[in-house]
Amino acid sequence: MYDLGTLGGTISNANAINNDGEIVGRSTLANGAIRAFHYKNGVMTDLGTLGGAASVAFDINDKSEIVGFSRISNGQARAFLYKNGVMHNLGALGGTDSRAIGINNRGDIVGHYTKTDGSVHAFIYRDGQMFPL
């Protein structure tokens, strides 16, 4: 067992590892805020947010593409794809929240979104578009 450390806070959770040993998850900052992280070669990097207070990374593929969710400025959650140093908002199919849970090496992303009526549904994000399942 190896302690990855934190981003300055007291808690971190690892959620996924790829075949190159890169790890993603969430960690608290010194002020208690929650941030998605990427851990590679002994360095934990804060992935930031989409303008809100928190983010969490759930999966990473062998191309170092990371998925998870981030809060946006109004507090809603949005699925994200973190690629080439940039966090991309994947949207919510007109709903109130979304979370990306998994990504394969082809770049297909799966997760769930919440409709305005409160029901939760699965999605797949492929070729730049989110589709309900």
Image: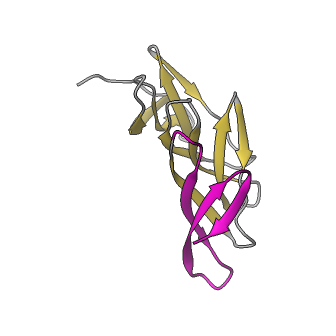
Q: Residue furthest top?
A: 41
Front residue (pair 1, 20): 20
Horizontal placement of 79 versus 128: left or right? left
**Image location of residue 106, percent across then percent down:** 57, 42
**Picture residue at 28% right of the left edge, 22% below the top:** 2
Residue 109, position in %: x, y? 57, 52
Image vertical order of residue 13 relative to residue 72, above or below: above
Identify which residue is drawn at 38% across, 24% down: 4
Query: Is the residue 81 above or below the residue 37 in the image?
Result: below
Q: Is residue 34 visible?
A: no
Q: Position of residue 15 (x, y in %)?
A: 40, 42
Write the start and end of the magenta stretch as one range: 105-133
User: For this view, does 36 lie left or right of residue 85?
Assistant: left
Q: Quadrant of the C terminus?
A: bottom right
Residue 48 part of the magenta segment = no
Q: Residue at x 42, y 31 (%)?
A: 18
Q: Is residue 14 left or right of residue 64?
A: left
Q: Quadrant of residue 33?
A: top right
